[in-house]
Image: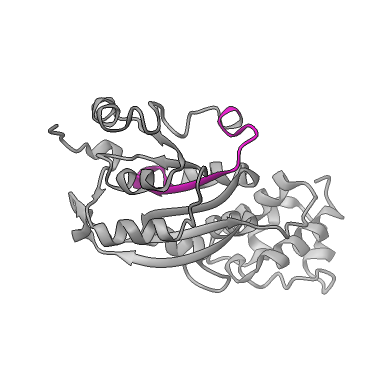
Amino acid sequence: MSYKHKKRFGQHFLNDNEILEKIISYADLRENDTVWEIGPGMGALTDKLIQNNIRLNLFEIDNDLIPILKTKYSNKCNIIHQDILKINWQQELENKIVKIVSNLPYQISSPFLYKISENYNSFETVVIMLQKEVAKRICSTSGKKDYGVLSLKIQFFFNTEYLFEVPPEKFTPPPEVNSSVIKLTPRKDIKFSYNTKFFWQLVENSFRNRRKTLRNNLKIYALPKEILNSDTCPIDLNRRGETLSEEEFITLHNFICKFTSC
């Protein structure tokens, strides 16, 4: 069947057999695993996945691709014609442990990553291809220029592994940027049990203006002057948010909570 790619869906279909197999190898697939593929396109990755005797779910938003996918895979996997960002995640994940293997559409990368973070306990392994810039941000560490809220948010829930890069010519049509494949596995050492909503607000405010110090970015909390201007705080407030590790943000959160109604 003929098909015309749609820019609005960020469609760049991977066409390299070696890379397709390499992606799947990192997912450590076992017989009867429940696997999600998001944005299967014409099914290049799907063809490889179904060879592994898994329970495969394809999530595709494009009306024109559904007939193609049904013709190829109707008896081999579950085809779900929905926007992955709008599905009932609780319902789809109920009593399941899922692996995700996908060449993820670029424009949904960040919201999708936040969704899986909210449901991290339901995922065993996530192997996804992203825009290189986003992949670098996810796997970055404190002190690096691409370290930020996304880095902290994903690494709070997942161990991250930057696997390999994929050049534009490996896609049809070729994107204007390089891509990278990363692997996420849920952390088993999450010990933080305070007000998570306030914690993430604190992180976001710390990065609100990257050139400003923590002291300036955190003035919105109206902390007593003697606290901001003394040696009482366990974190040096003359530092910038991008220099703080997860553990240091937790320490800062606990300190601020002593003086606010967080």
Q: Residue at x 58, y 47 (%)?
A: 123
Point out residue 198 in the picture as x, y percentages from the top left corner: 72, 47
95 falls in the magenta region: yes
Q: Residue at x 46, y 42 (%)?
A: 54
Q: Can residue 149 be seen here?
A: yes
State the residue lying farthest toward the left.
Answer: 2
| Start-end of magenta stretch | 91-109
**Front residue (pair 149, 39):** 39
Point out residue 131 in the picture as x, y percentages from the top left corner: 35, 56
Q: Residue at x 65, y 68 (%)?
A: 245
- What kind of colouring is applied to the model shown? one colour
Quadrant in the rendering for residue 240:
bottom right
Vertical placement of 177 versus 243: above or below? above
Q: Can residue 208 be seen here?
A: no
Vertical placement of 90 versus 40: above or below? above
Quadrant in the rendering for residue 3:
top left
249 falls in the magenta region: no
Q: Quadrant of the N terminus?
A: top left
